[in-house]
Image (spheres, rainbow, N blue to C red):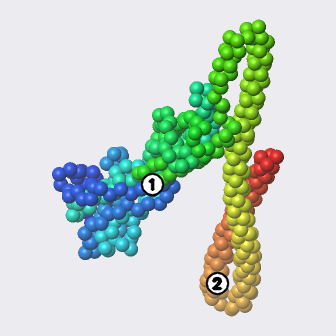
Amino acid sequence: MIHKLDGQVFGCIYIFLLLLQPREGQSQETDLSQTVKAMLGDDVVLPCQVKPPEDPTQTTVEWGRPDLKPRFVFVLHNQKEYIADQNKVYRGRTSLFNDKLKNGNVSLKLSNVRHSDNGKYRCYNPKEKTESFVELLVGTISSPHISLSGLDKSSSGVMLDCSSASWYPKPEILWLDGEENIMSAGSAEKIKGPDGLYSVSSRVTVEKRHNNNITCRLTQKDINQTRETYIYVPDGFFMAQPDCSVCISFNIILAIAFAFGAVFLIWMKRKSKNTKKKISDECNKENEKLLTKVKNSNTEKEIQKSYEEQRRIDEQIEALIEMSKYLEEQKKQLADQKQEAEKMVEGNEGKLREVDEDIRKEKTIEKKAQGYLILKGIITTNNQGLLERMKGHQNVELMTDKLMNKTQEEVTKLNERKMEIENHIMELKS
């Protein structure tokens, strides 16, 4: 009875046997050091080489992840992929290179990788009882952003914040001066979000002795990725240290001429107040300039992002218009075919009338009946086929109309979105 089992039942039995096979102590583990690195959304290949089979059509391989349930990522047996017990997160994203199976190359292609794909993958050959492991590391990066957090009165310096979100794995963050020297900064804050991605931030105090070009750099060595941004701090942004000579002079003058001390003190206070106000005004102006510069930089980025979105919308509109043209042509062809079918039906009915007239001229009733029935049956069958064909054309034509209407609706929506982006760009530029 075994030979009567269909392919689906046999596949279920095969998967069941794989589940029953011992996973430790009966296989030869090889090459544990392989690591494949990729960025979010990439397509990757997890390498695996087995002994070339005598008959490539009999190749059997199991790709799995021991930490998942079900653990199966991809299973191939006798040129057939079995998906009944495949983990659903991998459906439609895995495949082998069929032209390389004869060489024993059973490497797995994984498309559009996600963060959930991070982990250790097991390539198992049931026939040879050999296995190998590949570690997949999927990374994500983003650009950092520097902002002004305030002034440090104790050192007359400027405090800067640098932050960046959506990193994996966790990056390192450094502050560098204009000469690429590492600056002393507070401990970085690294927070892991519910999606498994890291957000990092750090603060540094920039003193006037530093070069005014300050860089914030994020580095992830595991995926060999670096992102950085910089800011220029004007000289006038640093507060001047108070001059103690004023106090000394005041004490000397107070000691020598006490009588004039009160007047001189009032004058000095007024002068000091005016000087502090001037310094404060200059600091506020420089503050506004720096914030304006940062704001303008962000505005330019937002404008560039809007232009990119506008370009993608133009491409989508162009594709939809092409589809609309194709559907219009298809609709025209269907209408022509429908008209042709109608003519054929009319022609068949005309032939049927002619046959009726010819049969009536026959003298023998038996011959008339036989000829009439045969010809009428043939023509009726042809007419039924043509009517079915016309009905099918009509259904396709209706579907084409719906697709054309849907396409036009999408074009209208995209044009409206494009108009919103253009208005947004004009607001940013103003």
Name the amino acid type tagged 1.
Asn
* Residue 262, position as x, y percentages in the image: 76, 10
Tell me the distance, in whole angstroms, between the alpha carbons under discs 2 and 1.
Answer: 80 Å
Which residue is at 20% across, 58% downward? 28
Name the amino acid type tagged 2.
Leu
Against 406, residue 294 (above or below) is above
Left or right of 277 in this view: 41: left
Against 403, residue 346 (above or below) is below
Which residue is at 70% across, 53% downward? 304
Against 342, residue 131 (above or below) is above
Residue in front for this viewpoint, 49 or 345:
49
Which residue is at 27% across, 72% downward? 52
Which element is circle 1 on?
loop
Which element is circle 2 on?
helix
Q: State which quadrant residue 329 falls in.
A: bottom right
Query: In this orientation, does residue 119 appear?
Result: yes
Q: Which mark is residue 375?
A: 2
Query: In this orientation, does residue 338 appear?
Result: no
Left or right of 385 in this view: 186: left
Q: Which residue is mark 1?
A: 224
Mark 2, other Cα within 10 Å: few <14 / some 14–19 / many ≥20: some
Which residue is at 34% across, 51% downward? 120
Residue in front for this viewpoint, 211 or 252:
252
Q: Which mark is residue 213?
A: none
> Label 1 near label 2: C-beta < 8 Å?
no
